[in-house]
Image: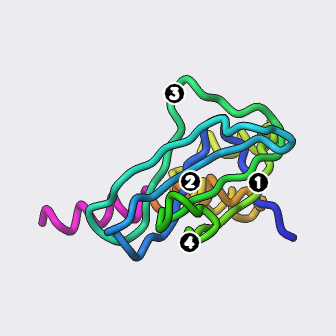
């Protein structure tokens, strides 16, 4: 099993959702925990990539976590919901890598994170650059 890595205290979670008529549930649990440390339900207006962020008051400590995103098909029988679960490790950022990142543009940072196997930051930065470019194309 592959476990993804983040160095952020507040990582960005991205998920593709193709159906919007059902509520979407997001839950974050620390490994070994019995209760979610964060939970949110939302309705979407259109299919596509959903960006989920943690509140400013919640910062993840170095540990292993699991997040789940589910389309709520059946509240009485949650096992019938369509869901995806992902495990990830929150690790501290290496000082050498931190120094390199300070001199880079966001796209260069995304590449550096990807080469270092830190996929949450790599994908979040690439997504941010992509949506910014898409917004720029719409305003032209």
* Within-10-Å neighbours for mark 3: few <14, some 14–19, many 20+: few
Residue underneath mark 1: 88
C-alpha separation, residue under disc 1 versus residue under disc 4: 20 Å
Secondary structure of residue under mark 4: strand
Residue name at image x 40 percent, y 65 percent: 130
Q: In the picture, which quadrant includes the C terminus?
A: bottom left
User: Image quadrant of residue 88?
Assistant: bottom right
**Residue bearing the label numbered 2:** 13
Q: Position of residue 1 (x, y in %)?
A: 87, 70
Q: Where residue 25 is drawn, which disc sits there? A: none
Q: Where is residue 113 in the image (x, y as percent from the top left)?
A: 69, 56
- What distance separates the C-alpha of mark 3 from that of mark 2? 14 Å
At label 4, counting other C-alpha atoms closer than 10 Å, the crowd grade (few under 14, some 14-19, many 20 or more) is: few
Q: Could one spot residue 19 in this view of the protein?
A: yes
Q: Give the range drawn in magenta.
A: 128-140
Left or right: 23, with 38 as reference point = left
Work out whether mark 1 precedes mark 4 in sequence or the reverse, and give the earlier one. Answer: 4
Q: Is residue 110 left or right of residue 132?
A: right
Q: Which of marks 2 and 1 is nearer the N terminus?
A: 2
Left or right of residue 19, residue 119 in this image:
right
């Amino acid at each position: 099993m592959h476990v993804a890595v983040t160095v952020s205290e507040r990582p960005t979670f991205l998920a593709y959702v193709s159906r919007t008529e059902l509520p979407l549930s997001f839950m974050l649990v620390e490994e070994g925990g019995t209760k979610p440390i964060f939970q949110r339900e939302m309705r979407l207006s259109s299919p596509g990539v959903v960006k989920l962020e943690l509140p400013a008051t919640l910062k993840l400590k170095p540990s292993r976590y699991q997040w789940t995103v589910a389309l709520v098909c059946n509240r009485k029988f949650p096992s019938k919901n369509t869901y995806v679960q992902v495990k990830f490790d929150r690790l501290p950022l290496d000082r050498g890598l931190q120094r390199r990142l300070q001199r880079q543009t966001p796209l260069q940072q995304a590449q550096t994170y990807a080469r270092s196997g830190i996929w949450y930051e790599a994908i979040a930065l690439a997504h941010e650059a992509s949506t910014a470019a898409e917004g720029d194309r719409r305003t032209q």
